């Protein structure tokens, strides 16, 4: 038997040696998950002895984490704007930047019932958050990936969100109608970056990450098509890569969008283009 503290220390050392960043935080999450408590609650029970029943499966997940399986896949869920979403290899692991995007959008949305589209919904975090926060509105969540849509469906059921429609669509191929808001976190990573990516990112579906030589293939298709699916004064809100702002800005402007603005993320990167249908 080992105590909670000894287990945390040992696990953090193990992960550290395998090059895992924030090894102690990772270890605390894995143990808290195993014990069914929060990370903070671990601190009040450092002396608690842990039986082999707890330690054996913990060693298994520790080994996987050491091999570069993402923490979020081992925990099976991820927090996003105050809700827990299921998270697995069917879709991109939700990123903190996308949570920032959700918060910016919620502040900008006008009052009243809206028609909203989340294009490339993945696990559903963005569109389902908007649906949950705006129960008077209707959100269409679209993705080309059946896997992603099945995860979105499970998340909607788990969270009891019903003001939604799920559509399998290659961008707008199966979308009809016009929207007050179109939000999209499409794949935007250049193909060539695959080799130098962190081990964890190889567990995200390639379909959700890569988009041609400069990462902009899908956005180049998406931006002009989106124009015709927005109502007058409708808002487009995007997430893009760290060096794509000027390309995307000129794309938006040449398609006739107005009020183009590229907002920065918490790291200061021009990450979120916003534009309006005139
Ligand atoms: N931000 C993600 C990354 O750099 C990419 C997400 C995306 O392509 N939409 O790993």
Image (cartoon, grey):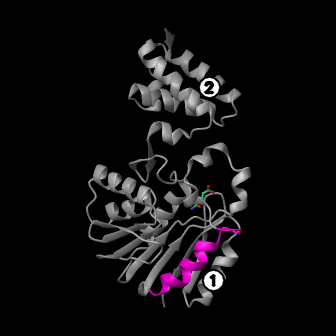
Please rate how many residues cluster around mark 2, counting C-alpha atoms within 10 Å: few if below 14, some from 14 to 19, many from 20. many
Q: Is residue 169 left or right of residue 257?
A: left
Q: Is residue 42 left or right of residue 114?
A: right
- In the rendered image of this protein, does residue 11 appear above or below residue 80? above
> Residue 202: image x %, image y %?
61, 48
Residue 240 is drawn in which quadrant? Answer: bottom right
Q: Residue at x 70, y 69 (%)?
A: 214
Residue 223 painted magenta = yes
Question: Is residue 124 visible from the viewing direction of this image?
Answer: no
> Residue 265: image x %, image y %?
60, 62
Q: Residue at x 68, y 64 (%)?
A: 242
Residue 122 painted magenta = no
Find residue 12 and name its label. 2
Q: Quadrant of ligand 1?
A: bottom right
Q: Depth-wise, is mark 1 or mark 2 nearer the camera?
A: 1
Q: Earlier in the sequence, mark 1 or mark 2?
A: 2
Mark 2 within 8 Å of ligand 1, using the beta carbon: no
- Provide the residue span drawn in magenta: 212-228
Residue 274 is drawn in which quadrant? Answer: bottom right
Find residue 237 and name its label. none
Q: Residue at x 49, y 85 (%)?
A: 227
Find residue 251 and name its label. 1
Q: Is residue 256 left or right of residue 52?
A: right
């Amino acid at each position: 038997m080992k105590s909670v503290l000894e287990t945390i220390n040992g696990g953090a050392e193990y992960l550290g040696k395998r090059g895992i960043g924030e090894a102690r935080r990772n270890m605390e999450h894995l143990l808290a998950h195993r014990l069914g408590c929060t990370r903070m609650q671990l601190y009040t029970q450092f002396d608690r002895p842990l039986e082999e029943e707890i330690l054996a499966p913990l060693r298994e997940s520790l080994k996987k984490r050491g091999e570069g399986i993402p923490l979020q896949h081992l925990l099976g869920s991820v927090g996003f704007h105050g809700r827990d979403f299921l998270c697995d290899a069917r879709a991109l692991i939700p990123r903190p930047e996308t949570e920032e995007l959700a918060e910016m959008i919620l502040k900008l949305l006008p009052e009243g019932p809206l028609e909203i589209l989340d294009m490339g919904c993945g696990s559903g975090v963005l569109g389902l958050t908007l649906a949950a926060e705006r129960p008077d509105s209707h959100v269409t969540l679209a993705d080309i990936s059946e896997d992603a849509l099945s995860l979105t469906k499970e998340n909607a059921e788990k969270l009891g969100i019903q003001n939604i429609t799920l559509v399998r669509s290659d961008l707008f191929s199966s979308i009809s109608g016009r929207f007050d808001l179109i939000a999209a976190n499409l794949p935007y990573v250049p193909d060539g970056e695959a080799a130098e990516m962190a081990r964890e990112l190889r567990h995200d579906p390639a379909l959700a990450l890569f988009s041609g030589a400069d990462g902009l293939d899908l956005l180049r298709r998406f931006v002009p098509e989106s124009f015709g699916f927005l109502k007058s004064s409708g808002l487009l809100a995007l997430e893009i890569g760290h060096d794509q702002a000027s390309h995307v800005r000129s794309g938006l402007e040449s398609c006739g969008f107005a009020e183009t603005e590229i907002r920065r993320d918490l790291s200061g990167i021009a990450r979120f283009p916003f534009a309006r249908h005139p």
